[in-house]
Amino acid sequence: MTTIATPDAAKADAAIRVRNVSHHFGEEGEARHVRALLDTSLDVERGELLCLIGPSGCGKSTLLNVMGGLFEPTTGTVTVGDKPVRGPMPHDIAFIFQENALFPWNTIFENIMLGMTFQGVPKSEREDRARRALEAVGLDEFADHYPSQLSGGMRQRAALARALSLETSILLMDEPFGALDEQTRMVLGEDLSVLLSRSKKTIVFVTHSLGEAVFLADRVAVFSARPGTIKEVIEIDEPHPRKPEFMTSAKFHTLRDRLYELLHDEIRKSMSQSAKPKRAYEDAVAKGEA
Amino acid sequence: MSAPRDRFKGGLASRLVQVGFLVAISVLWYLATTRWGVNKLLLPNPLNVWDQLVDVIAKGEYLNDLRITLTELAFAFAISMVSGTLIGFAISRSPYFTKVFEPLFAGIYSIPIILFLPLYVLFFGLGPASKIALGTTISFFPVVLSTIAGFSNVDRVLVTAAKSMGASDYQLFRYVLVPAALPVILTGLRMGFTVALLSIIGSETIASLGGLGHRIVNLAENMDMARMFAYIVFAIAIAAFLNTTVSVLEARGKRQR
Ligand SMILES: Nc1ncnc2c1ncn2[C@@H]1O[C@H](COP(=O)(O)OP(=O)(O)OP(=O)(O)O)[C@@H](O)[C@H]1O
Ligand SMILES: [Mg+2]
């Protein structure tokens, strides 16, 4: 099946444009050779929140890293605005990683300041921006705590504050709430929805949670099993900020079920894929006996 | 409620036990020489030793030997600290070099390098140079090994995060690699310091022209046991002071990165 990621063809003002991107790790023929992404094309529109969802190991993180210039794709191109992506673009793109990636030897405040130092924000502006970012995520009272002194949810909010302080137009988030419990991620999701409806940022958000995807996203891109490519893109037509009631609505459930249906087959496929070595082993045993 | 008691147990009480232990040994020592008839040539009376120690310190007789030993230590540790961290950092930048050199250094570290002392004496003579060479060789390995370990085990996510925010190579080194590796490196430096001190005093007792170890052996050969014990106590006190200082510096360095 062909992958037409953006229904209305190539939007003129896409924030990120991914064209025929394939990525593999290791060299062809090596045992460690993995084809992570296969001929993926996708436009992320300005100001939208796009969720990537798919079986584990299908290449979602790989795509995110390629979009942000952290991996160079094996083939294909990525453009941000009108610039081709050739490496990190700290002025356009901020990352939030699954493992929050705060520097454990710095306080939350120092972490945020350091991010801006790296990005090259003038000294005089840094402190002000750090305070505002901490307020935005409700952590102003914890500025002088070390990451190890915060809960998992607070750490992710701190990482979000660091990303926000960089004032980039694009945020790439790789399972930012993945390590948190269901209730915390729901609340953080609501907060994020409010925050984003104000900020007009373009966001790509990887998640494993169908509910989170439907609740947060303007569009959800569903991946096929590895080598991953985008199988279908689903629109979630509901204005931001989204209310908790949306989660109990019939529309929410219909969309969620639709996503589940799409994912189900791919997850089965990816599971039989990872069982391959075992099957080869069984074949060998069978031959040995014959 | 139990917190103050625990602190008492952890701090003051354990200090008391330690002091009590030293007092008990001194008392046993005293009894052995006065009551139990241990030969004075083997074990002098502790009160005698104390008098000798006061004499050694009052006359400043120890100064020259202490100066020699500390100078050797300073040179040996400075050389292994600089070369160990620089070489360790360089090796850690390449997975290939790490794979080659790490096991090699770990292997050399585990052999008794003191065996090279006769060779070093032939090369560098009986003076301080051979002690410095031996102390450097022995303390180089814990420093280089911990530096390699420290820099090659930096959490990759932190490096990626710093790069994604636009960190330059220098910023990456200064704000991510160094703070991440520092605790491990500091531990290696402390171990390096300790083994340098041990090997330098030790080698002074084997073949030397001066230094605390040399003095102690000289007194033993002259059967001046009380004064020899006074120097042993003196050397132990100096070593304890230096090692405590280094441990405090290590702890402080780990807190402020
Ligand atoms: N640095 C790497 N070296 C080699 N192979 C890798 C590397 N990173 C990822 N892979 C492989 O590429 C494939 C895709 O990885 P990726 O991390 O993009 O998956 P994902 O969709 O994010 O999975 P998950 O949902 O579990 O996070 C996986 O099969 C993985 O084994
Ligand atoms: Mg992933």
Image: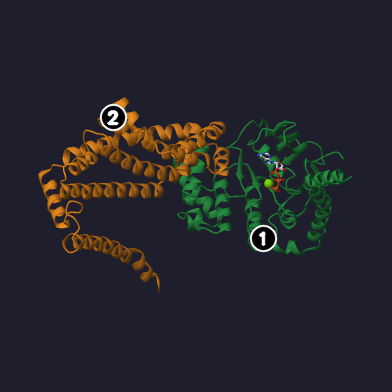
Chain colours: A green, B orange
Who is closer to the viewer here, A241 or B20?
Answer: B20
- Residue A186 is tagged as 1
Disc 2 secondary structure class: helix
The quadrant the C terminus of chain B occupies is: top left
**What subunit carries mark 1?**
A
A84 and B55: which is toward the camera: B55
Cα gap from disc 2 to disc 1, whole angstroms: 69 Å
Question: Is A279 in front, or is A161?
Answer: A279
The answer to whether residue B81 is left or right of residue B43 is right
Write down the residue under mark 2: B129
Q: Chain of mark 2?
A: B
Q: Percent position (x, y) of residue B88?
A: 46, 34
Image side of residue A44 versus residue A272, left or right: left
Quadrant of the frame with the N terminus of chain B:
bottom left
Q: Which residue is drawn at the image coordinates 32% and 34% (left, top)?
A: B76
10 Å crowding of disc 1: few (<14), some (14-19), many (20+):
some
Inspect this view and state whether residue A104 appears.
yes
Residue A281: percent from left, percent from top: 80, 45
* Marks 2 and 1 close (CB-CB < 8 Å): no
**Rendered location of residue A227, percent (x, y):** 78, 40
User: Closer to us: mark 2 or mark 1?
Assistant: 2
Classify mark 1: helix, strand or loop: helix
Q: Which mark is residue A79?
A: none
At label 2, the amino acid type is: Ala
- How crowded pointer 2 is (Cα within 10 Å; few <14, some 14-19, many 20+) is rated as some
Drawn side of residue A98 relative to residue B3, left or right: right
User: x, y (%) of residue A57?
Assistant: 73, 46
